[in-house]
């Protein structure tokens, strides 16, 4: 008896298809699982195809599940590699705890190392420079953030003369009454250019504001007590260099060298949010560079042999160039650099003046900020010219007043 397979309930039996032999004259395909002479049931073939499709779908789903499980296993393996064999990740509090534990275990050796005369001299200079400069740094950061956020850039555009040659010295003198460090002068200058102020005047403000504002001049007077000529020399040399760079840009500068920013750094935020964001940014950056500058000054004072410093200080040209390069490398905030310069007692007042004139106008962080605000092509042309003019202005002013 031939074995047939009934259709599922509710399904209608499809009419029989014409055999392949009737349609094309070819012999029908034989199935080894069926008796000889029995034709395959049409619905059975469709049902088998459907089951095959379902099984293929289930196979693809299981394959994708396997691939997902494999990726999860790989991710868990990578997490296991990061966390270690015990499953704990190496976080910052754990690192701090380990460092403090090592410091406690090695406290006798650390106490012995800090008790040496060299380290005591180093810590004395470091603490003195940091403590003296920190109040001026905080006050300058607060005032510069308030000016950058609450004073509209249109105020400067209305206050400056329309003629570029007259706008340059007015913008340079405006830096004397608007306190702010170099970290704040770059975005303010970018806002001035964006609001239509002539670039020569904006660049003169950029160079003068961090160098001759009241906070910086007060800090210079405190760092050099009994030396009012040092305060006057810093004011005149910085203003002279700022105006000269502005006039030089007006003369030879090209508009395609300057790429003004498309929008302000704090646009889209409220006044309070922008103010505290500016304060946090300037405190973190300027405070970090102050610590580095104090460490470098302490190292030069305590660790460098006195014979080397005397040799460098006795050569006027070498001492001036050395402190000019040091000002670029240290990148100290202008509210604090006077205390670092005053600690370098082996060098002449003219060399210290060059240090104070160069630092607020061009250093490593200023170069990076100028390149990000106005373009790399501008910074590559503006920074070397500023360095040369700052050294020359400091030397000429020091030769006359000091």
Image: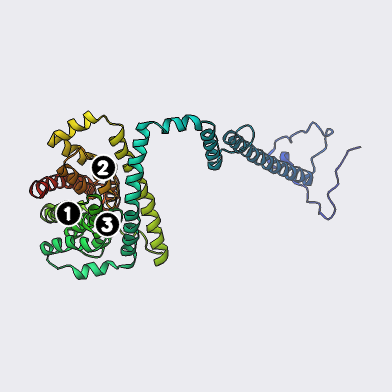
Mark found first going from the N terminus, 1 or 2: 1
Dot 3, crowdedness within 10 Å: few (<14), some or many (≥20)? Answer: many
x and y percent of residue 376 in the render?
26, 47
Residue lying farthest right?
A: 1
Residue 343: which numbered mark, if any?
Answer: 2
| Residue 322 seen in this snapshot | yes
Residue at mark 2 to residue at mark 3: CA–CA distance = 27 Å
Residue labelled with disc 1: 228
| The one of 205 and 23 positioned closer to us in this rendering | 205
x and y percent of residue 120 in the render?
37, 36
Which quadrant of the view contains residue 33? top right
Residue 243: which numbered mark, if any?
Answer: none
x and y percent of residue 175 in the render?
21, 60
Residue labelled with disc 3: 185
Q: Are marks 1 and 3 in contact (CB under 8 Å)?
A: no
In the image, which is nearer the foreground, mark 1 or mark 3? 1
Residue at mark 1 to residue at mark 2: CA–CA distance = 17 Å
């Amino acid at each position: 008896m031939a074995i047939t397979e009934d259709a599922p309930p509710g399904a209608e039996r499809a009419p029989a298809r014409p055999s392949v032999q009737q349609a094309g004259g070819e012999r029908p395909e034989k199935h080894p699982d069926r008796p000889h002479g029995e034709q395959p049931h049409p619905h059975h073939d469709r049902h088998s195809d459907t089951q095959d499709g379902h099984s293929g779908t289930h196979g693809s789903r299981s394959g994708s599940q396997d691939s997902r499980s494999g990726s999860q296993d790989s991710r868990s393996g990578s997490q296991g590699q990061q966390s270690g064999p015990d499953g704990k990740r190496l976080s910052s509090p754990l690192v701090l705890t380990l460092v403090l534990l090592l410091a406690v275990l090695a406290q006798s050796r650390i106490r012995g190392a800090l008790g040496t005369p060299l380290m005591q001299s180093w810590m004395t200079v470091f603490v003195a420079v940091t403590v003296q400069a920190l109040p001026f740094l905080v006050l300058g950061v607060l005032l510069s953030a308030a000016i950058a956020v609450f004073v509209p850039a249109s105020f400067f555009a209305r206050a400056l003369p329309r003629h570029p040659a007259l706008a340059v010295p007015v913008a340079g003198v405006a830096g004397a009454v608007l306190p702010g460090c170099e970290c704040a002068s770059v975005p303010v200058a970018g806002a001035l250019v964006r609001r239509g102020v002539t670039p020569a005047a904006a660049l003169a403000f950029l160079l003068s504001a961090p160098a001759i504002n009241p906070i910086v001049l007060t800090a210079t007077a405190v760092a050099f007590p009994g030396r009012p000529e040092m305060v006057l020399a810093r004011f005149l040399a910085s203003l002279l260099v700022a105006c000269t760079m502005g006039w030089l840009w007006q003369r030879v500068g090209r508009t395609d060298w300057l790429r003004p920013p498309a929008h302000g750094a704090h646009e889209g935020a409220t006044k309070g949010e922008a103010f505290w964001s500016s304060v946090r940014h300037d405190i973190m950056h300027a405070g970090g560079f102050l610590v580095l500058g104090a460490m470098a000054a302490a190292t030069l004072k305590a660790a460098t042999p006195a014979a080397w410093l005397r040799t460098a200080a006795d050569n006027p040209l070498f001492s001036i160039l050395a402190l000019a390069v040091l000002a670029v490398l240290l990148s100290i905030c202008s509210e604090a650099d006077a205390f670092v310069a005053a600690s370098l007692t082996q060098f002449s007042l003219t060399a210290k003046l060059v240090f104070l004139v160069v630092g607020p106008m061009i250093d490593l962080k200023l170069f990076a900020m100028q390149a990000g605000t106005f373009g790399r092509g501008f910074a590559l042309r503006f920074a070397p010219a500023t360095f040369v003019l700052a050294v020359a202005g400091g030397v000429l002013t020091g030769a006359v007043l000091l």
